[in-house]
Image (cartoon, grey):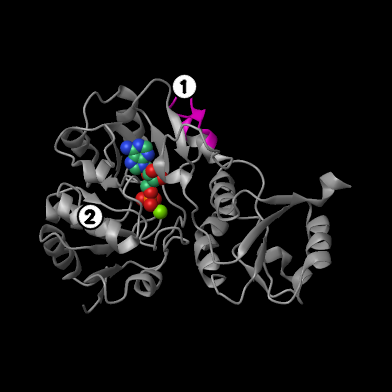
Amino acid sequence: MNTLILSAADPQAAQTAADLIRDGQLVALPTETVYGLGANGLVEAAVSKIFQAKGRPQDNPLILHVAQASDMERYCHSIPKVAYALAERFWPGPLTMVLPARDIVPKATTAGLSTVALRCPDCAVTRQIIALSGVPIAAPSANLSGKPSTTTAQHVYHDHKGRIPLIIDGGPCRVGVESTIVDLSEGTPRLLRPGGITPEQLLEVLEELVIDKAVTAQLQAGDVVKAPGMKYRHYAPNAQVLIVKGSRESAARYIHAHFVPGDRVLCFREELPLYENCAPLAYGLESQPETLSAGLFAALRELDDPHVSRIYARCPEGGGIAIAIQNRLGKAAAFQTVNEEESL
Ligand code: AMP
Ligand code: MG
C-alpha cells in the first residue's frame, strides 16, 4: 500500500481523509497532543484495524474524537453537569472525559467497558475531518504499541509506512503529550492520566479530584486498573531508562560516575554544558516546561536505537505540565529513579 502524506493546508486534505474514514480505512491525524491513528469509531471492523496496525492489546480501549461538545449526548448517557462545565472550559483541547457509553458505541472501541472516553481536539483540520465524515473518530496515539508517541507526521510515516493509506501533516504537535483523562462515570472525578490540562486547571472547575495511583507509580499485580492502558509498558525506547533526580550538580556527579560508552543523557537544554562527553540530548528548557512536553517524545524516539544501552534522564519537578512529563518518563523508566542527594 502506498502511504500518502497530505499537508493540513492542502484544500483536498480534509475531504480525502473523511472519505477514507467513511470507507472504513485508517488515517493518521494531527492533534495538539500527539498524532492519532484514526478510524470510524462506530464500526467494529474499522476499529479492529487500529489494534492490528499498532499491535495494541485488545483490552485497551480507544478515545472517541468528536467535532463539538454537543456530540457528547450521541455517544454517552447519564452525563453529569460537571462534564458540560469541563467541556465548556477546556474543549476543544487536551481533555478526555470518561462517561457511561450508549449502545451505539461498539465493544471493540470501549474494549468491552460500559464507559467510553471522549475528546474534542484543538486542531481545525481534524475537527473538519470528523465533521465531514459524520462519525466520531476513534484514535489512539499513532505509535506502534509500547513505543514513544508520535508528535510529527514523519514519526507516523516511520512506524506505518506502506501499511496505512493516508497521513495528514499538521506539523509538530504543540502540547506533545497525550490528553488528560478524567473519569466522570462514578462518584468523585478521578484523574486517570495527566496531560495537557493540569490538575490545577481542572480544580478551577471541579470541587474535588482524586489522583489515580497509576499516575504516579508502577501498578502492581492485584491493583485495580481504571484506565486499562496504564498497566502496559509504555513510551519506552529500547534502552533502559533511569531517572536521575536532585540538583543539577548532584545529578551530574551521579551520571559522570556511572556513564559508560553507549549510554546517553536526556537532559534540559540548560544542562548541556555539564554533559559534553556524555552524548547529551536536550528535550527542552527546564525554565519553560511546556517546551519539555513538546520535545519529550521526539527525543525518546531519537534515543530508541539498539546501540544505546542506558539513558540517564532528567525530569522536571513540581506541578502543572511537569506532572504529565513525570508520568511519561516514569512509565518509560518503569518508575526507576535515583537521587544522589537523598543517599548522601
Ligand atoms: P491512547 O489513545 O493510546 O493515548 O490511550 C488511550 C487511553 O485512554 C488508554 O490509557 C486507555 O486505557 C484510556 N481509556 C480509553 N477509554 C477508557 C475508558 N472507557 N475508561 C478508562 N480509560 C479509558
Ligand atoms: Mg498511546
Q: Nearer the viewer, residue 112 or 71?
A: 112
Q: Is residue 237 positioned above or below 154 on the image?
A: above
At mark 2, the secondary structure is helix
Magenta: main secondary structure equals loop
Q: Which mark is residue 124?
A: none
Q: Nearer the viewer, residue 209 or 157?
A: 157
Q: Which residue is mark 2?
A: 48
Q: Is residue 259 positioned above or below 97 on the image?
A: below
For label 1, the crowd category at 10 Å Cα-Cα, with few meaning under 14, some 14 to 19 and many 20 or more, is: few
Residue 276 position, x and y percent, is: 76, 75
Residue 233 position, x and y percent, is: 50, 52
Q: Amino acid at mark 1?
A: Glu
For label 2, the crowd category at 10 Å Cα-Cα, with few meaning under 14, some 14 to 19 and many 20 or more, is: some
Taking 161 as reference, is 326 left or right?
Answer: right
Please tell me whether residue 315 belongs to the stretch shown in magenta. Answer: no
- Find the magenta span and give its range: 202-213
Q: Amino acid at mark 2?
A: Ser
Alpha-carbon span between mark 1 and mark 2? 38 Å
Residue 297 position, x and y percent, is: 50, 62
Q: Which residue lies at the image location 58% right of the left edge and 40% below the top edge?
A: 216
